[in-house]
Amino acid sequence: MEYDLIAPCYFGTESAAAFDFKRIGAKDVAVTDGRVSFRGDADIVAAANLWSRCAERVLILLGTFEAKTFDALFDGVAALPWEELLPADAEFPVKGSSLSSTLSSVPACQSIVKKAIVKRLMAGHKTSTLPESGALYKVRFALRKDTVEIYLDTSGDGLHKRGYRRNSTEAPIKETLAAAIIDLGRIYPDTAACDPFCGSGTLMIEAALKALNMAPGMRRRFAAEQFAFLPREAWTRQRTRALDEVRRDATFTAVGTDIDPAAVALAAANGKLAGVDAHCRFAVTDVADFAPDAGSILFTNPPYG
């Protein structure tokens, strides 16, 4: 079965995000402001989560309809086949947003969406109780000019949470935005990169992941791995494929420096957690003494003040 998928991303990073989805074989990849849409089966859902460097999450689009009243919102949500997607014990929190729509109260819309799902699930599973003690299915909605889109969040935690940055220094850059900046620098397996304000090492680590062709999501889990309607074998296949595609012969090198010894120690620890410590070196250096190696590309997120 194929699904309509939506991947929100930062404005300006859409083309970089779209490239990742084309690369994994997604169909009908299309870019609009702040998001990428595409189609694919369970393997594409898994691969999109594992390989997306710039998108914030991967959502399954369940339905689109117009709603100017709460009754219309309720009926539109209740018309979706929730019992085919969510088991009777599913935990299903609802979050959403509303922009330029008649239904402007997000809390009220959340309540209506939740009630509609409850009614459909009770009827579909022939039960009077929904304990919500099972797997997590995050439901999201977006109201834009009275048009409603209903999604299931396959990622869970945002995709910027790669699993390697347990802690960070003050004012860190998000991993997804760092990856988009790295993409603009055209990183290759033999590139040399540097960052004189490395902080917790995010830019250099993302550059290494790109150069080594390491899937950024390999060190974390995703909500959809527990979805009953998606085969777990798809995740196993895509993780195995990702491991096989790592460029183990890459000669990429990264040098990150910072005046703060604690930041440098943290960057080194993060690099090890990311599995790129053999390619990244972090050292305590004042920027006044920083001298990049000849031919290296400089990336940085300088401190303010």
Image (cartoon, grey):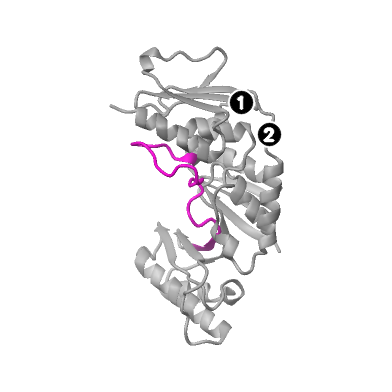
Residue name at image x 55 percent, y 51 percent: 7
Nearest the viewer among 79 and 207 is 207
| Residue 242 lies within the magenta run | no
Q: Is residue 203 above or below residue 57?
A: above
Q: Which residue appears at 63% of the width and 54% of the height?
A: 46
Magenta stretch, main secondary structure, is loop
Of residues 299 and 74, the one nearer the viewer is 299
Residue 49 place in picture, x, y as percent:
59, 51
Q: Is residue 83 visible?
A: yes
Residue 258 % position (x, y): 39, 24
Q: Which mark is residue 71?
A: none
Residue 287 x/y as whole percent? 38, 17
Which amino acid lies under the numbered mark 1 shown in the image of this protein? Phe
The crowding category of the residue bearing disc 2, from other C-alpha atoms within 10 Å (few below 14, some 14 to 19, many at least 20), is: some
Q: In the displayed structure, does residue 251 sit left or right of residue 100?
A: right
Q: Are marks 1 and 2 in contact (CB under 8 Å)?
A: no
- Quadrant assignment for the N terminus: bottom right
Sequence order check, earlier mark of 1 and 2:
2
**Above/below status of 160 relative to 80:** above
Q: Which residue is mark 1?
A: 252
Instruction: State which quadrant residue 259 falls in.
Output: top left
Q: How many marks?
A: 2
What residue is shown with label 2? Answer: 247
Q: Secondary structure at mark 1?
A: loop
Whether residue 161 appears in magenta in the rendering, the answer is yes
Residues shaded magenta: 148-175
Q: Is residue 181 above or below residue 78?
A: above
The residue under the point 56% across, 34% down is 276
Relative image position of residue 137 (x, y in whole percent): 51, 66
Identify the image quadrant of the C terminus: top left
